[in-house]
Image (cartoon, helix red, strand yellow):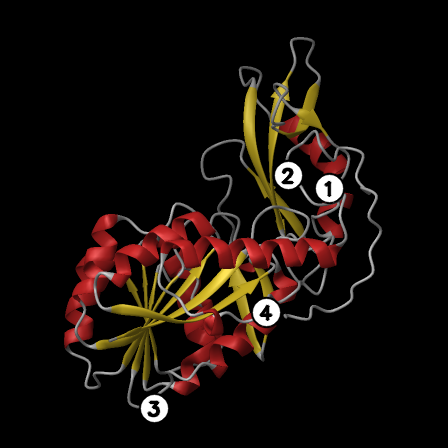
Amino acid sequence: MIVLPQIPHEVRPVCPHFGSCGGCQHQDISYHEELRNKESGLVSLLTQKVSISLDAFSPIVPSPQIYHYRNRLDLKLVKRRDGRVDIGFSPERKAPVLEIEACLIAMEKISRFIPRLRLEASGKIPKDYRMANLTVRCGDGGDVRWGGIGRRSLRLAEADHFYTDILGHRIYYSLDTFFQANLSILPELGRIIRALPVWDKEAVFFDLYGGVGLFGILVHDLVARVVNIEENVHAVRIAERNVRDNGLNNVEVLPGRIEDVLPKMLNNAKSADNIVMIDPPRAGLSDKAIRLLNSLERARHLLYLSCNPQSLAENLVGLSQGHWATKFVQPLDFFPRTRHVETLVLLQRN
């Protein structure tokens, strides 16, 4: 039996909007029970879909912070006919917006900023706008920034980039780039990845959908070379900054689609035991991407970081048809009090 840490927590919902906004689903149970449910649900789903030994599953990693962990909120702005501006979430059963003054799963800096956001957005929204989607974000620093009204409003100057410090590296990101929502659990994820039995000083680590370069930077010292492949030009620029500012000389950032970049780069690698990592969107991998991964001949290990167990299960079925076998499954609670769970999977070519 898996023994989870005893984390005392008030079972009564602490948010007045619980059950209305749709963001949280587990404020009415203990955190211990939430972790157990997420872990058992993941094991049941994956073992029904794919041939995975129960010994491959590692106990779920709890979040160091149960509340106040999200570094990003996506909010809806709706301007009424009388000119009043409402800012909040799109509820599951109501329209058009559930107005909020704070969000208890957002970092405290963001919650405290919401009243100011309402004032700033109200003064900035054009007269002919009736609705806007706002993004609010922060990092380890003290600044909270937002965008969503007007073209290029999510772009930040380099001096305004957010950052977080992970395992001795400072990683920058922006409003218009993807980054993991829960900063508090990232160091543990980094340690787990570094401890996997895949690293080889002769191998190349290919980080597909590499974003701002987080994972390649965290493992650069364990391999001969890191290749970060990313299609989003804004993420590419910040990845280049992260490589430069961390003083790394064995990390290469390549803009482009993985279908165009990966095969050539992989075929030129000296080692046959290369490592590929994927961290796709919630919808998971396309059939085309799965066919590409199944066709790789000079990659021995595949790391898959997923935020959606359903799409993960479907993708693992497809990858298993290409001689990939699942060797290790590590659930991590990136999203406490919600239904979501992050999962790191190690696959090995048979």
Q: Residue at x 56, y 49 (%)?
A: 340
**Residue with the mark numbered 2:** 23
Q: Earlier in the sequence, mark 3 or mark 4?
A: 4
Q: Is residue 189 left or right of residue 269?
A: right
Is residue 328 in sight in this rendering? yes
Q: Residue at x 34, y 58 (%)?
A: 316
User: Relative to 315, is 206 above or below?
Assistant: below
Q: Earlier in the sequence, mark 4 or mark 2?
A: 2
Q: Secondary structure at mark 3?
A: loop
Q: Secondary structure at mark 4?
A: loop
| Relative depth, front residue between 159 and 225 | 225
In x, y percent, where is residue 120? 68, 33
User: Relative to 177, is 3 above or below?
Assistant: below
Q: Distance of mark 4 from mark 2, alpha carbons?
A: 25 Å
Residue type at mark 1?
A: Cys
Q: Secondary structure at mark 2?
A: loop
Pointers 3 and 4 in contact (C-beta within 8 Å)? no
Residue type at mark 4?
A: Pro
Residue type at mark 2?
A: Gly
Q: Distance of mark 1 from mark 4, alpha carbons?
A: 29 Å
Q: Secondary structure at mark 1?
A: loop
Any mark on residue 201, and which? 3
Q: Earlier in the sequence, mark 1 or mark 4?
A: 4
Q: Nearer the viewer, mark 4 or mark 2?
A: 4
Pointers 1 and 2 in contact (C-beta within 8 Å)? yes
In x, y percent, where is residue 34? 68, 53
**Residue with the mark numbered 1:** 103
Check the picture and name the quadrant holding the C terminus: bottom left
Check the picture and name the quadrant holding the N terminus: bottom right
Where on the picture, by quarter, is residue 33? bottom right
